């Protein structure tokens, strides 16, 4: 699956029929993922755009990644998300599990999920060091 941030493409894994792949994370956050309350969702014909309130960052998601985003409700675990993805796209359940894990890990790395801590260049709210 593909997610782009401000126009720069980021692969959400590798090896699947549509760009997803294996996840290397076994993060405890993956139990019941849900969107960060600071992220706005805007659907469009090929997927969706995510926007972090208070920043100038946007992410574009393809159709399968946008579906995963829409299913993040804090009540479904990654296995349930994968079952839904496999059913909707008629893909192998193992492939769906790998793709969901890769996409959710990508959302987490980009601090798009509730409980994710923005870090590095993801945080547009850092105070500037002004000359004295």
Image (cartoon, rainbow, N blue to C red):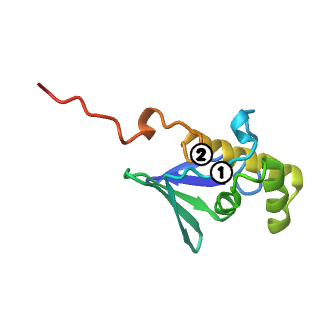
On screen, residue 45 above or below 35: below
Q: Count how many numbered circles sit on residues in the image.
A: 2
Dot 2 lies on which element? loop
- Residue 13 visible in the current orientation: no
Dot 1 lies on which element? loop
- Residue 127 visible in the current orientation: yes
Q: Quadrant of residue 131?
A: top left
Residue beneath the point at 26% across and 33% down: 128
Q: Position of residue 59 (x, y in %)?
A: 50, 55
Q: Residues within 10 Å of mark 1 (few under 14, many from 20)?
A: many
Q: Position of residue 90 (x, y in %)?
A: 85, 66
Name the disc covering residue 114, or none. Answer: 2
The quadrant of the rendering that contains the C terminus is top left
Q: State yes or no: discs 2 and 1 in contact (Cβ < 8 Å).
A: yes
Comparing 67 with 132, the one in front is: 132
Residue beneath the point at 43% across and 53% down: 6
Most extreme residue toward the bottom is 45
Name the disc covering residue 34, or none. Answer: 1
Residue beneath the point at 83% across and 49% down: 79
Question: Would residue 71 be found to the left or right of residue 9 on screen?
Answer: right
- Dot 2 or dot 1, earlier in sequence: 1
Q: Position of residue 42 (x, y in %)?
A: 52, 67
Q: Residues within 10 Å of mark 2 (few under 14, many from 20)?
A: some
On screen, residue 121 above or below 33: above
Q: CA distance from mark 2 to mark 1?
A: 6 Å
Name the disc covering residue 67, or none. Answer: none
Most extreme residue toward the top is 132
């Amino acid at each position: 699956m593909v997610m782009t941030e401000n126009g720069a493409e980021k692969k959400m894994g590798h090896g699947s029929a549509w760009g997803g792949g294996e996840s290397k994370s076994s993060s405890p956050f993956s139990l019941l993922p849900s969107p960060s309350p600071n992220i706005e969702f805007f659907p469009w014909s090929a997927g969706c755009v995510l926007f972090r309130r208070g920043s100038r960052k946007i992410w574009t998601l393809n159709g399968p990644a946008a579906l995963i985003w829409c299913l993040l409700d804090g009540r479904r675990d990654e296995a349930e998300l994968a079952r839904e993805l496999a059913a909707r796209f008629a893909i192998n359940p193992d492939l769906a599990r790998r793709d969901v894990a890769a996409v959710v890990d990508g959302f987490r790395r980009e601090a798009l999920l509730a409980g994710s801590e923005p870090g590095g260049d993801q945080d547009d709210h850092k105070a500037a060091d002004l000359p004295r």
